[in-house]
Amino acid sequence: MKKIDLVIIGGGPAGLSAAKMAAESGLSSLIIERNFKIGGQLVKQTHMFFGSEKQYAKTRGIDIAKILVNDVLKYSDMIEIMTGTTVVGLYKDKVVTLLKDEKYIKVKTKAIIIATGASEKVLAFEKNDLPGIYGAGAVQTLMNVHGVLPGHNVVMVGSGNIGLIVSYQLIQAGVNVLCVLEASSEIGGYKVHASKLKRLGVDIKTSHSIKKAIGKDYLERIIIGKLDDKWEFIEGSEEELIVDALCISVGLSPLSNLLSMIGTEMKYVSYLGGLVPLIDENYETSIENVFVAGDVCGVEEASSAIVEGYLTGLVVAKKLGYIHPNYDKLYLDFKAQLHNLRSGPFGEKLRRGLEEIMR
Amino acid sequence: MLNTNGVPDKKQIFSRFPDKKYILKPKAITECYEEIPCNPCSTSCPFDAIYIGEDINTAPIVDFEKCTGCGICVYNCPGLAIFIVQELDNENARFKIPYELIPLPIKGETWSGVNRAGEVITKVLIEKVSLTEKQDKTALIQVLVPIEFINDFITIRSKL
Ligand SMILES: Cc1cc2nc3c(=O)[nH]c(=O)nc-3n(C[C@H](O)[C@H](O)[C@H](O)COP(=O)(O)OP(=O)(O)OC[C@H]3O[C@@H](n4cnc5c(N)ncnc54)[C@H](O)[C@@H]3O)c2cc1C
Ligand code: SF4
Ligand code: SF4
């Protein structure tokens, strides 16, 4: 059995930052990523990021990925990376089972940081399984990673930041975005993103949703309708739109099933996107030396995922006896950055959610 | 309404425009009304003219005394929420706007001018197009806009 002090599951912004900080502290690690390349969600995000300079604001997501990957590659003697490898099992004695090229590999470790991110939520409506109906993240991957257009006439469901940003990127790719539907009476994402779309001629229809999809072998048309304040369709408000793709962006939920497997205490917190582990102030779960960082413990932003990664990398290293020369200063700085990112009105639900999972 | 369709109202728009005495020189207008965790406009300004402060959720405030209209904040704003405006004379205003679509306009062309609701309101002349390495793929387009649209014009769409 392979032995290593620290296993990091997930090579997104949280996992990469954790590995870097652990390495800076003197602790070696193994990053396991199921995708063929590391970078997580960032590899498809062509827009400039929000946040502050410390989290690479104004840099495009794809370039933040490059910075984080390069940081990790600088420590190639300390950080081992396995791509195309999925963690399929996690056990209390800290044995991790990996699946690579249809072979199982076992790794014995002392500490684990779970940074598996989140997955897109689905929406129930008639014929929601027709080809041509995608998650917004899938559309982003198709367009920005593989260079394939999802369709020519698209409707977006959901006006959170992801829905608004992916709509903008569809327009950049030359796709006609007919409208954005939002069930709530107000736009969900940042208004700067909404204004950017509106001036390009895209209507954001609040209090609207998708009723059903129509098509024989693939999506041909959709029926949308207006919602009352109980989110029920208003009779007679239906409208038919001709589309060849529909993009669903109704939120993400933490990919926390590995945590359930190892038996950490979990809680369903809607503010955080779903089932999340209870954590202490250093993101340690109810099982000693099992930590979490990034969207897996509450759907948030890359900016906070990076800082949570740094924080857990720093703390895990110390617990295993590798103390970063600037430990105290860095620790306070990471805490302050997280506080700052979450202190505005958009951070309110998140703050409440995090309170609910504090051990 | 900003919250329901993404269009700021007149009051919000005017709240970001400077006094008339300032606008004879180019000035930055930050159409960023919400408290969101973001501050590159402030940190990228070489003249220290945009204030956000310690709490990055604070909405930006431009000091029009200090702002030179250089345009650096325009391409550094991830929300594409900043533009530069100047009252040139009785007939025209000059704008510098961020632009991330292709094809890019070419100097000398006439394009449609669009308002915040996405409607074509006028014709505008493309005076300059810049896209340096530093701008990281966000072009700056300098356009001449009829003065009566100084509070309405926001972007350009398709060549005429
Ligand atoms: C359209 C869009 C726009 C966004 N815009 C912004 C923005 O402007 N600013 C911002 O700060 N954030 C933004 N975000 C959010 C940001 O991308 C995420 O919050 C961030 O990527 C979360 O990082 P993470 O490391 O937790 O997870 P991820 O980036 O999702 O990485 C998790 C990684 O774990 C891997 N993994 C999962 N399960 C396993 C397993 N069992 N075995 C091995 N590997 C596994 C996945 O393949 C993935 O690579 C945006 C997101 C989207 C979709
Ligand atoms: S235009 Fe130049 S001087 Fe004015 S706020 Fe922007 S960066 Fe600063
Ligand atoms: S950079 Fe743009 S979006 Fe960010 S705070 Fe400044 S004006 Fe607002």
Image (cartoon, coloured by chain):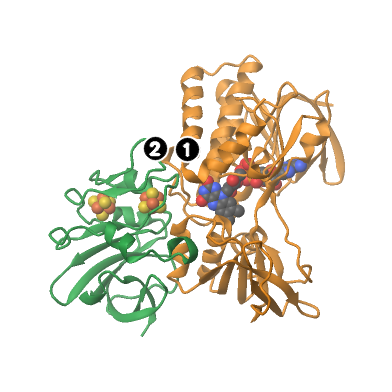
Question: Residue B10 appears at what percent x and percent y?
Answer: 32, 66
The picture quadrant where one finds residue A291 is top right
Q: Residue A217, percent across and down?
A: 80, 78
As drawn, A23 above or below A87: above
The chain letter of the green chain reads B
Above/below status of A260 relative to A234: above
Cβ atoms under marks 1 and 2 closer than 8 Å: yes
Pointer 2 chain = B
Local secondary structure at mark 1 = loop
Q: Would residue A130 be visible to someone looking at this image? A: yes
The residue identified by callout 2 is B55
**Furthest residue in direction bottom, as rendered:** B160
Which residue is more in the foreground, A68 or A215? A215
Residue A343 disc label: 1
x, y percentage for residue A216?
Answer: 80, 80
The chain that appears orange in the image is: A
Q: Nearer the viewer, residue A219 or A87?
A: A219
> Can you tell which mark lies on residue A121?
none
Badge 1 amino acid: Ser
Question: Of the residues shown, which amino acid type is indicated by label 2?
Answer: Asp
Q: What chain letter is assigned to the residue under label 1?
A: A
